[in-house]
Amino acid sequence: MIPNDPTLFRFRGLFGIPVQVHLSTLFLAAILIHYNSTAWDVVAELIAFMLLMLALYLHGLGQAVVARLHGIQVRQVAVSAGLSLCDTDAADPGHRMTILAMGPLTNLTFWALASLALPLLRGEALIWTVEVFATLNLCLAILSLVPMRPLPGGALMHLALSRVMPQVAADRIAGAIGLVCGAIWLPAMLLGYVFLGLTLLIVPGFSGHWRMLHLRRALGLREG
């Protein structure tokens, strides 16, 4: 699912892959950067926000690269306030699962590389920057695997269930799990902002999960 909030700007990124940055990133910046703080705090928060945007872009770029390696057309990478997805023509479920999984795997790779580089670095500012970059990539990798749409983890779980059970059952289970995770997600993001100063502006797909649970269940009862 590609973010549907208004487009802020577009540019051509690495490997010639178009990138579309959405307006919601500005709202995220307004929340994360506290302009009434000291000048140094504002600079640190601005750097952290830019590193978050970079980690999000790398998430979508990893998906785009693996899609191209499979010969699949990539239309764009869309980056919003906490979500980065690659828009492709992938129709095969196996290819779609591989593309979706490559996002968190890319973040994990950069977390590992940054963590390994830390002992070799000198300078407090540089060490802090790399530590923040590593932490953000690890957090994105974990959060993106939460089994809830519109996160990649929601689509991955649904595709995986569809491969091992009837579609109706897969829809019902994915819908139920998505509703539970969505109910937990909102207070978790609020607590993350209050105690850590970080959050992601992602609204759980409650309506989609509700339809998957109830409409498919009705269909299953009729078929039974």
Image (cartoon, rainbow, N blue to C red):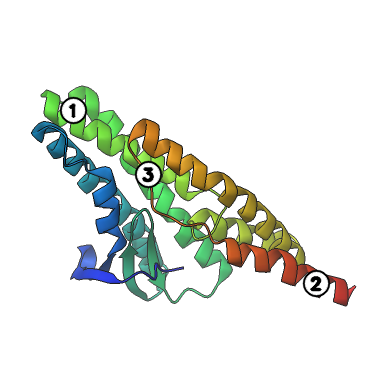
Q: Which residue is mark 1?
A: 127
Q: Residues within 10 Å of mark 2 (few under 14, many from 20)?
A: few
Q: Residues within 10 Å of mark 3 (few under 14, many from 20)?
A: some
Q: Earlier in the sequence, mark 1 or mark 2?
A: 1
**Tag 1: residue type?**
Ile
Q: Residue at x 21, y 65 (%)?
A: 13
Q: Residues within 10 Å of mark 1 (few under 14, many from 20)?
A: some
Give the image location of residue 149, x and y in percent: 53, 59
Q: Who is closer to the viewer here, 18 or 80?
A: 80
Give the image location of residue 151, x and y in percent: 48, 56
* Quadrant containing the C terminus in the rendered view: bottom right
Q: Is residue 157 above or below residue 142?
A: below
Q: Earlier in the sequence, mark 3 or mark 1?
A: 1
What numbered label is drawn on residue 218? 2
**Tag 2: residue type?**
Ala
Q: Which quarter of the figure has residue 76?
A: bottom left
Q: Report the side of 55 relative to 209 (left or right).
A: left
Residue 2 shows up from this direction = yes
Alpha carbons under labels 1 and 2: distance apart: 56 Å
Q: Are marks 3 and 2 in contact (CB under 8 Å)?
A: no
Alpha carbons under labels 3 and 1: distance apart: 23 Å
Q: Earlier in the sequence, mark 3 or mark 2?
A: 3
Of discs 3 and 1, which sits in the foreground?
Answer: 3
Alpha carbons under labels 3 and 2: distance apart: 37 Å
Q: Is residue 66 above or below residue 193?
A: below
**Tag 3: residue type?**
Thr
What numbered label is drawn on residue 199? 3
